[in-house]
Amino acid sequence: MSDLIKTFSGKAAIVTGGTRGIGRAICLELGRRGCNVAFNYAQSVEAANTLRDELTNLNVESFAAQVDVANTEAVGGFVKEIKNKFGRIDFLINNAGITRDNLILRMKEDDWDAVLDTNLKGAWNFSRAAIRFMLKQEAGGVILNITSISGTNGIAGQSNYSASKAGMIGLTKALAREVASRNVRVNALALGMIATDMTGALDDAYRAKILEQIPLGRFAQPEEIANIACFMASDAAAYITGQVIQIDGGMAM
């Protein structure tokens, strides 16, 4: 590989929700650039093992565990284990997220709690655990929160998801101010429609309706998000912190 691709050689990253869609694409792109990668997963051991094999084939180290992002104690233990294994934590990508859509009058309390716990508390848990190590490193670190245009604009039927993703934006900006002086950067990507399993389940009529709202006329590929995430983690973005980068094909401009 070229020197450009190997720019993360010797560095270590954590990607939450790494086995599917955007998280998986980010793990693999980090690996292609020489980064050692740790990730958690919610259910599929088979998917985790497959991803670990692919990372091994990229000649990088990997580490995976089934960890509930909302469990503060479990997250702390997982992050500490990663630090012990890799000796450092350079990048944290808070990608894990779920949806439980419904109109607010029909939404169950459990659906509100599950989305806020996974999407927002999960990002807080991992940020809190990882930043302890980043602050002690001369090289600092980078935290990247994967949020959504649902958090910037609000989407009907997603009061829980919109609230969680808007909360991630607030977390991004507040944390960026706290740690900038210690060479830790914190940013967010506000995503539009991405071609994942979730959007693949949309019926044709609804998909066509959404496409009409996207000036570029298509969904993004996970690999496109992964490339932008790696740019934001790289030294090329060393003067960017506290920002929300909107990646939505023009949908919410």
Image (cartoon, rainbow, N blue to C red):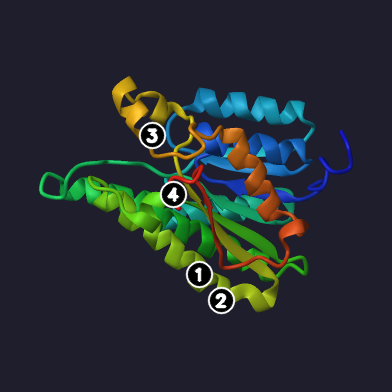
On the image, numbered disc 2 is attached to which residue? Answer: 177
Compared with 227, 43 (above or below) is above
Of the two numbered discs 3 and 2 in the rendering, the one whose residue sits closer to the viewer: 3
- Disc 4 designates what residue? 69
Rendering quarter of residue 241: bottom right
Three-letter amino acid code at the position of disc 1: Lys
Spatial separation of the CA atoms under disc 3 and disc 2? 38 Å
Q: CB atoms at circles 1 and 2 under 8 Å apart?
A: yes
In front of the other: 87 or 89: 89
Callout 3, which amino acid? Glu
* Label 3 vs 2, first from the N-terminus: 2
Give the residue at the far right of this rendering.
3
- Indicate the position of residue 175 as horizontal and vertical percent values: 52, 71
> Is 85 left, or right, of 93 in this rendering?
right
Q: Nearer the viewer, residue 108 or 226?
A: 226
| Residue wearing tag 1 | 173
Name the residue tied to disc 3: 212
Q: CA distance from mark 2 to mark 4?
A: 24 Å
CA gap, disc 4 to disc 3?
Answer: 35 Å
The residue depicted at 32 percent of the width and 49 percent of the height is 161
Mark 4 / mark 3, whichever is N-terminal = 4
Do the numbered discs 3 and 2 sit on residues whose CB atoms are within 8 Å? no
Q: 10 Å neighbourhood of mark 3: few (<14), some, or many (≥20)?
A: few
Q: Earlier in the sequence, mark 1 or mark 4?
A: 4
- SS state under label 3: loop
Of labels 3 and 1, earlier in sequence is 1
Q: Regarding mark 4 in the picture, which secondary structure is present there?
A: loop
Does the rendering let one see residue 113? no
**Vertical order, 237 against 101 (above or below):** below
Instruction: Residue type at mark 4: give it.
Output: Val
